[in-house]
Every structure is written in structure tokens, then in C-alpha cells.
Image (cartoon, rainbow, N blue to C red):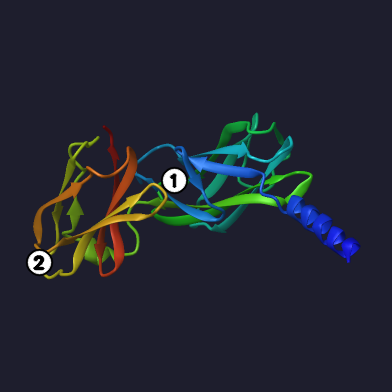
Amino acid sequence: MKKTLLFSFLFSLFMGGLYAQSLEISYHNEVITNDQELNILADPQASGPAEVAIKVKNIGNASISVKLRKYDVNLMDGTNVTFCWGTSCYGPNTYLSPEAVRLDIMASDSSFHGDYNYYGTQGTSQSRFTFFDEANPSDSVSVVVNYTVGYLGVNDNINIGLSISNAYPNPATTTSYVDYKLPKSMTGASLRINSLLGVTIQDIPLNRNEGKAAIDVSKMKEGIYFYSLIVNNSIAQTRKFIVKR
């Protein structure tokens, strides 16, 4: 009986060590859970790529060498995703980093960024980035990035006569305002406020065809937020603003 208990105890320790999570990733100092989605917005008129930068931290009990795997879930035609990791940057046809980054216990690395090259193409593309221990690939953590350029989710005909302004003041401390305009035939629109990690903070009904919406930021933490015009349960336009004390 004692041998059985001892074996069970040792086996549980072995399995616990085998599947222990050694990696933690964060975006703008917000910890990202495994396979969490990030929404990155880009101006279709901008000349450069849309970029996401992720910090990787070793929270395990031993030093590890970390590699990166990219998987393009869904890309718009004519677009591509490149990435940098460690001291090197790689083209769109590289899906596994040749280089590993050595991380000591509780050490962090901020060299990663994933660039979406969209060349003016509007719509949403999605890529997954997985960071893993080179010696134990099952010890990994992933993030899914939605790169959105311009409008999405609403027919172009609906977008005619529809607009939202830049938030003001921006940065905001207590209240920020957004001017909006809707076609006369449109009903059921709202302004949705999301955190950087996609969590919905507020839904503000828009009951008139034209007006000004007030966003109460007094209880929101400092950081970057997004506001989206929601029409027929779809996102018509999205912009970002900053809360700063």
C-alpha cells in the first residue's frame, strides 16, 4: 500500500513537472491567457504595417530556450504576416523561428513583434503565434491576433451616410466624447467600448440619427481602449482612444 501511494505521489510530481506552464505573455503590461485574441486596428491609408508587440516571460523554475511558431489562420488576398524574434526578423514564408531565445528564471524578452503587411487591403486577417520551450514543445502559450484594416462586418452600402469622429479629449481623464452620424433609416445602433484585450466595458445606445455620445472613463484603468460603432449587431467602424490620469 505504501509503495502504491509513493508511486502515485512521484508520478503526480513527474506529470505536474511535464505539463507545468513555464511561459507567460503580455501585451501593454496586460497578461494574455492562452489562445486569447487580440484586436489590432490599422488605418487603410497608413504606409507601414500593422504591428503587435508581445513580451514573453519565463515563470518556470529553470532556464529555457524559447522558439516561436507562426500559423496564418486566415489572410486576406494580397496580404502577409512577418515576425521578429530574438536578433532576427523573418519573411512571410517562415513559420518556425530558426533562432531560440534563452530565458533565465523570471527573465523577460520583448524582441517579438508580428507585422501585418496589408498594402491598403481592408478587412480582417488572423494569425496565431505560439511560444514554446525548445526542449519541451508541449510547454507553450499562444496568442491569436486579429488584424483589422478599415471597416468590417457591414455592407458598403450601409456605410454610406454613417460616421463616427475621433474621440475628444484624447487622452481622457473623466469623460470622452464621440460625434456620430447615422442614415435616417437606421435604428438599433450603439457605441461599444472594448479594452485592449477585447473585453466589452460599455455599450452606449445611440437613439438619434445624429448626436454626441459620452464615454464615462472615470472608473477605467489607464491604457488603450477601442470604441466601435455597432450596426445590425456588426462592427461598422472602430477607433481607439487613451485613458490617462
Residue 136, compared with residue 105, is above or below; it is below
Left or right, 13 with reference to 239: right
Residue 184: image tag: 2
Identify residue type, mark 2.
Lys
Name the quarter where the N terminus is drawn.
bottom right
Give the percent coordinates (x, y) of residue 116.
Answer: 49, 45
Q: What residue is shown at x 22% (from left), y 37% (from top)? A: 172
Q: What residue is shown at x 83% (from left), y 55% (from top)? A: 10
Q: Residue furthest front?
A: 2
Residue 173, compared with residue 144, is above or below; it is above
* Dot 2 or dot 1, earlier in sequence: 1
Q: What residue is shown at x 12% (from left), y 70% (from top)? A: 185
Q: Residue furthest right?
A: 3
Residue 119: image tag: 1
Name the quarter where the C terminus is drawn.
top left
Give the CA separation, mark 2 to mark 1.
34 Å
Q: Quadrant of residue 225?
A: top left
* Label 2: element kind: loop
Residue nearest the viewer, comparing 155 with 144:
144
Q: Quadrant of residue 209?
A: bottom left
Residue nearest the viewer, comparing 80 with 32:
32
Identify residue type, mark 1.
Tyr
